[in-house]
Amino acid sequence: MKTLFNSYINTFRGLSEEIWWLALITLINRAGTMVIPFLSLYLKEDLHFTVSHVGWVMSAFGLGSVAGSWIGGKLTDKIGYYKVMVHSLWATGVLFIGLQFLNTFATICLGIFIVMLVADAFRPAMFVALNAYSKPENKIRSLTLIRLAINLGFSAGPAIGGLIITGLSYAGLFWVDGITCIIATLLMIKVLHPKKAKILDVFEIKHPVSAYSDKAFMIFLVAMALFGIVFLQYFSTVTIYYNDVHALSELQIGIILGMNGFLIFIFEMPLIKWLENTKYTKLALMCFGAILTGLSLLILNFTSWSGVLIIGMLLMTLGEMITFPFSNAFAVERAKKGNQGEYMALYSIAFSISHIIGHNAGLQTAAAMGYNATWYIVSLIALICAFLLWMLNRTLNSKRLL
């Protein structure tokens, strides 16, 4: 047991102090983001929106995310990642607090759009900061540590969120989310100010390549958008499915979602360190992760036994643990060819597009055709994603596409 524990601890060795601070800031911020997993339920149960209306609100969520990621990338290349991160964090906190006072379909759509526009400007800046604060040989593990912080916060957030909803109301979630964003801002100003932080990986690009002309990266982004459509079902359609079909309460839903984050916190770093030492490429591993994620939804059609929800969550968690760290690392590596902000903004936008399409398409399909048909369709999308990644891997290995 001691050997196992030491082996686990060793996977964290060698990471810079700045990466640890960035992870803590992310943890504080993400722990408060308990509104997001319950957003579709909040709109349906508290504001009495129809499933169709919930789908359109989630599309506004995605549109704001696309706009925010694009603007964040542009601002990162112009004024630097630090200013973008600080202003995005505190403004998001204020906006989340204000969001609870909106209650009509039109104002909710506009409010969600603005919140996500400001909030997701943070993402490309954070990726560029992570690249600067990490030694080249530690990039994947640094990315994984940030994901661990996200998922540790996410494992606590939904469980606490379920308790808050049960004991108080949905309004409490907005206050907690806003306040934690502001706390994260204050911590960042304290510990990661440019005068204090140490830059470990600096490189100058004399003739940057446009991300839009990088064919391999464009194909990769399409695959990631498809993966996002599948993955994001767990944060809209699946939560309503848990409630409608299996009659789970908000607290039970929060515990299942929290299990996902807890398992990632415990197992992802050792898994990634082990996978790094295998013969498989990043793209091949992502392909396997996409298949597992699709399978996690497909098996929901096999039985009405509620235990299948746990099995599905375990499969999705494993798929997520494999796909996201290696996709992040692939994007960071490609970004060294051009403007980092532009590359990382497009990477973020791929998932923002998933928000636009995925939530709405899943909810509309479930409303029109039922959950069984929805899971079959989404599983097919996962298979197409895996095929694209497999073909891209073969092509890059044969040097036919650069």
Image (spheres, rainbow, N blue to C red):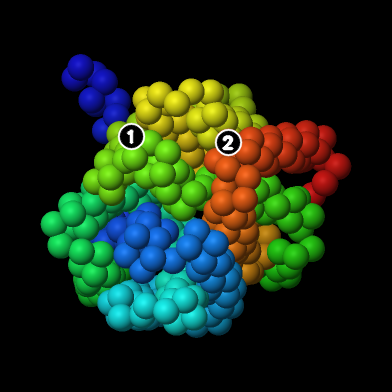
Question: Which residue was labeled with disc 2?
Answer: 372
Pick the residue in front: 366 or 38. 366
User: What residue occupies the far left of the structure in this picture?
Assistant: 167
Pick the residue in front: 59 or 73. 59
Q: Residue at x 38, y 36 (%)?
A: 246
Q: From the viewer's perspective, tell me whether residue 257 is left or right of residue 374.
A: left
Q: Where is residue 393 in the image (x, y as percent from the top left)?
A: 73, 36
Q: Which residue is drawn at 28% across and 45% down?
A: 249
Crowding around mark 1 (Cα neighbors within 10 Å: few <14, some 14 to 19, many 20+) is: some
Q: How far apart are marks 2 and 1 (CA)?
A: 27 Å
Question: Which residue was labeled with disc 1?
Answer: 263
Pick the residue in front: 362 or 390. 362
Q: How many labels does the image show?
A: 2
- Kindly state the secondary structure of the residue where label 2 is placed: helix
Which amino acid, mark 1? Leu
Q: From the viewer's perspective, tell me whether residue 371 is left or right of residue 93.
A: right
Which mark's residue is nearer the viewer, 2 or 1?
A: 2
User: Quadrant of the image for the N terminus?
Assistant: top left
